Amino acid sequence: MRGPRDSDNTGRPIELIGVPFDGMGRQGAQARAPAALRSAGLETAIPAPVIAPGDLPVPAPVPTRSEPWGFLNQAALLAMISALHKRVAGAVAAGRFPLIYGADCAVLLAAVPALRAVTGTAGLVFADGHEDATPLELSHSGEAANMEIALLLGLTGAPLPAELRDSLPALEPGAIAMLGPRDEPYRADLSIPTVADRIWLRTSEQVSGAPAGTARQAVERVARHAGRWWLHTDLDVLARSEFAACGAPGEPALAGGLNWLQLTEVVSEALGAGGCCGWSVSVYNPELDPGDRAAARIVQLVADAFRGSGFR
Ligand SMILES: [Mn+2]
């Protein structure tokens, strides 16, 4: 089994990929995250060589669902997935480490298939307050960021557009480890079944009790099935008292959650493990961040986690 410090990250270039996309189709909101995080010093805070070719081009948002597939903000979503897939595949093939920042968990619909396309296999270490495994046919909102795990695992029976059909499913159930969900009340309201009976999952409470050790278990689990894997952090894995700059208007906050130090430990452990090929940090909405304090804290998380895992 690979140890947590087996990878040599010295001199490994980090390719910054800003994704100005809002899955709900709002003007601004999560689409403003890349610019806000750069203003907060993201590029200079990373303690390693950085390549920043510019944000992904994303079409204007539309806050409604579209036929025939039924996704919210569908045209921008599919364009984002196609463009991001190319960017991630290019970065990984060139030996760089892609860091996707901005947008929401729908970025995984590009990142995981791109990793699989380049390396032949893909795993996912997934830290999120929600399971994000709503099948498309049960979705009330059409928001891809509530369904990406179901899509990646092939748990959805609905017909899919070519951008997704050609690259999904992209994950074996054994190749994903989920850290931090606490969304039972949300799923109960919508009658969405849990995936805890089908995949390796540790709840928010379990992770906060032993963040680094639980992350190490997650990595070992995924590495058994996929030698190359992606790391994802939906910042709503954090407690509301730690991070409140996310979510939909009127969306009830989930109880519990990690603190920043616990999340830093989880991410450092994963980044330092052999096999981690890229990282995404999503759901930050600068419009809910008066004074830019959350932006500064996210930048600190990124800097601390890279430093703690041997990038230099
Ligand atoms: Mn999520």
Image: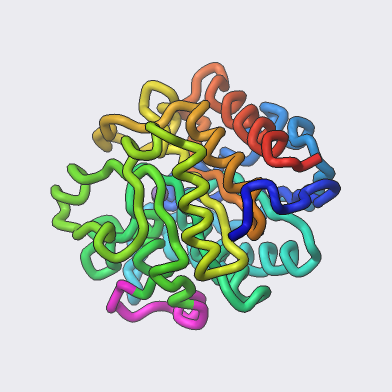
Residue pictured at 37% horizontal, 43% vertical: 180
190 up-or-down from 222: above or below:
above
156 up-or-down from 215: above or below:
below
Can residue 68 be seen here? The reply is yes
Pick the residue in front: 234 or 276.
276
Q: Is residue 84 left or right of residue 27?
A: right
Q: Is residue 70 left or right of residue 223?
A: left
Residue pictured at 52% horizontal, 54% vertical: 219
Q: Report the coloring of the rendering.
A: rainbow
Q: Is residue 224 left or right of residue 3?
A: left
Pick the residue in front: 227 or 131.
227
Can residue 29 be seen here? The reply is no
In this picture, which residue range is highlighted in magenta? 155-167
**Whole-percent x, y for residue 215 in the image:** 49, 45
**Whole-percent x, y for residue 34 in the image:** 63, 41
Task: Specify whether residue 181 is painted magenta.
Answer: no
6 up-or-down from 240: above or below:
below
The residue sitting at the top extreme is: 291
Residue pictured at 59% horizontal, 60% vertical: 1
Magenta stretch prevailing secondary structure: loop
Residue pictured at 55% horizontal, 44% vertical: 281
**Whole-percent x, y for residue 97 in the image:** 72, 54
Give the tally of numbered discs. 0
**Whole-percent x, y for residue 77 in the image:** 48, 62
